[in-house]
Image (cartoon, helix red, strand yellow):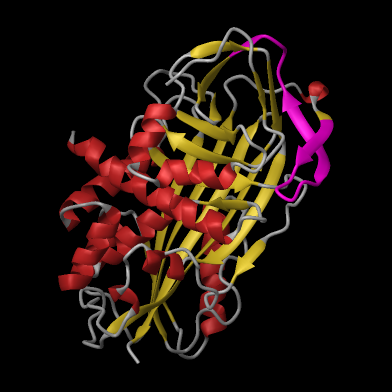
Amino acid sequence: MEEEQQSAGMADLAARLTKRLADANRDRNLVFSPLSIYAVLALLAVGASGETLEEILRVLGHPSRRELEDYVERLLDGSLDPDGGGPTVAFACGVWSDLRRPLKPAFRDAVVGRYKAEASSVDFRNDPELARAQINAWAAASTRNLIDSAVPRGTVHRNTHLVLANAIYFRGKWEVPFYKSSTKDRPFHRHDGTAVDVPFMTNHRKYYHYMAVHDGFKVLKLPYESSTAYTQRHCMCIFLPDARDGLASLLDKITSSSPAGFLREHLPTRRVKVDQVLVPRFELSFRSSVTALLKDLGLRLPFSHRADLSEMLNDGYEFRVQDVFQKAVIEVNEDGTEAAALTFYDVTAKSSQYPPEEVLFVADHPFAYFIVEEESHAILFAGHVVDPSDATGVVIPSGERSTTK
């Protein structure tokens, strides 16, 4: 029960972030990693005290820092050494402190020991560009070069004292791959009523899939290949509204009460015969400041002059979080999925129902998706597709605030 409550906290945060990012990007494709944001906030909790720590724990859904650390450590340990040929899921955490701002021993021990973080000293004051290059090199290595320029020029500067980051890499093959020879261009209907021809993947007709039909939407679960029953099970879940313009109302349903409970109750649990499955092939990238979204969710103190991050650095200065960024990419094709995300922040001084006998699952209009680890219900990646033909990256600067409250 305790594990279920802890995973519910992360699933709830993931769903609320998904809703707010979706509202801010209704006409743009979206991919992000809730788990990476969760992990980097857990790193922040290690260095926080007082009301700041209480606020972080409340947003993350944990009663204590120790329980949060135990939970994240289990997630990291379970994925760093996957057993038996399942998907590759790799996490990495990094901490870069200025040469003149040594880490407190207890903070270093916690982030290196429990979070397996790589801790380094860099010269932010005299050479911030070299420090940025070192962080980007770490990001590229941690994401198998899917993300090679996560930290843009000017993000870190001579007043930066500390940067904390989490990277996640995922690569999985479908348990039942799609046939490349069957992929054909078909129309995908956008929100605005226009259509664009994109490649749609399909299996043979009358194949058995994990699928459920609910009031107003369908859910298709696509498991990733795993060679043993003991390996963590991962899947992609596609939530397809019945209405072509129904994505926003579907996300409202998911986030209206208990998002974790909604996802758990509506995911398919058995295979049923599906007449035809059509899913677009897509490749997306996304970069955004998530600071405004986190503030909307109640995380305000770490960004303010009231922040208590006194457990991080030795020099006695008061600090606050300047901004939180994430860059994520995903590619979904006939063989499977490859995805990566990097989340980082810099610290500066304070200045179910089942389908009928025959049914179609045709994802030819905007839909939401989640990549889920089924035992813990950890959401590794989430997003939506509104135009599979558009692979261009979206950049939301830190000054652009969410309009959703």
Identify the image quadrant of the C terminus: bottom left
- Magenta segment's dominant SS is strand
* Span of residues in magenta: 185-208
Compared to 375, does 42 lie above or below? below
Question: Is any atom of residue 35 visible in this view?
Answer: no
Q: From the image, which quarter does the N terminus lie in?
A: top left
Q: Residue at x 46, y 84 (%)?
A: 124
The reply to whether residue 118 is visible in this rendering is yes
Q: Quadrant of residue 346?
A: bottom left
Q: Quick one: 282 or 400, which is closer to the camera?
A: 400
Residue 362 position, x and y percent, is 69, 27
182 left or right, relative to 303: right
Q: Residue at x 46, y 14 (%)?
A: 270
Q: Looking at the picture, how far across and down is residue 43, in whole percent?
A: 31, 62
Q: In the drawing, does residue 312 fall left or right of residue 402?
A: left
Tell me if residue 186 is in the magenta stretch.
yes
Q: How many marks?
A: 0
Q: Position of residue 238 (x, y in %)?
A: 56, 33
State the residue at coordinates (53%, 28%).
Answer: 219
Q: As displayed, is residue 308 above or below residue 31? A: below
In the image shown, does 221 or 259 lie closer to the viewer?
259
Residue 340: x and y, percent? Answer: 55, 50
> Is residue 191 shown left or right of residue 1?
right
Residue under the point 36% across and 62% down: 297
User: Is residue 384 shown in magenta?
Assistant: no
